[in-house]
Amino acid sequence: MGRVVHFEIHVDDMERAKKFYGEIFGWTFEDWSAYAGMPYLGAVTGNADELGINGALMQRQGASPEPGKAMNGYACTIGVGDYDSTEAKILNLGGRVALPKYALPGMAWQGYYIDTEGNTFGIHHPDENAK
């Protein structure tokens, strides 16, 4: 069975993206540029004993995603403990709403955002009372 074990977020400005994801989600970064042969920061997204995967910020090699166009790729969704405060951080750090908060009834709150690099990502707050 093929399981997702790593993700890459393509970015134009490595420091801006590092600040965005680090301040919102508490991710830490390790410079893996020597291995990749280009600017590449490994993203540690949680403790090794927690469910989830780590990834990286990778220097974008082509054009940025075009606003208003269909997505061409994967959208990673990040689990959060407080939807509204996470959304406030996203917006305060230059992110934009792509699809506003909505209920997955009896399960969670979900929404999608555009980061400072033009990439779409989701946030997911489990809440059995969501409706």
Image (spheres, rainbow, N blue to C red):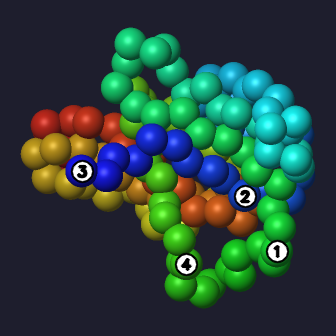
Mark closer to the chain start, 2 or 1: 2
Residue 10 marker: 2
Q: Residues within 10 Å of mark 4 (few under 14, many from 20)?
A: few
Q: Position of residue 101 (x, y in %)?
A: 39, 55
Question: Residue drawn at (26%, 36%), measured in percent from left and top?
Answer: 126
Q: Is residue 97 visible?
A: no
Q: Residues within 10 Å of mark 2 (few under 14, many from 20)?
A: many
Disc 2 marks a residue whose amino acid type is His
Under circle 4, the secondary element is: loop
Residue 62 marker: 1
Distance of mark 1 from mark 4, alpha carbons? Answer: 13 Å
Disc 1 marks a residue whose amino acid type is Gly
Residue 1 marker: 3
Q: Which of the 4 image quadrants contains residue 93?
A: top right
Distance of mark 2 from mark 3, alpha carbons? Answer: 26 Å
Q: Which of the 4 image quadrants contains residue 11?
A: bottom right
Q: Position of residue 34 (x, y in %)?
A: 88, 36
Asked if residue 21 lies left or right of residue 59, the reply is left
Q: Position of residue 61 (x, y in %)?
A: 83, 67
Under circle 2, the secondary element is: strand
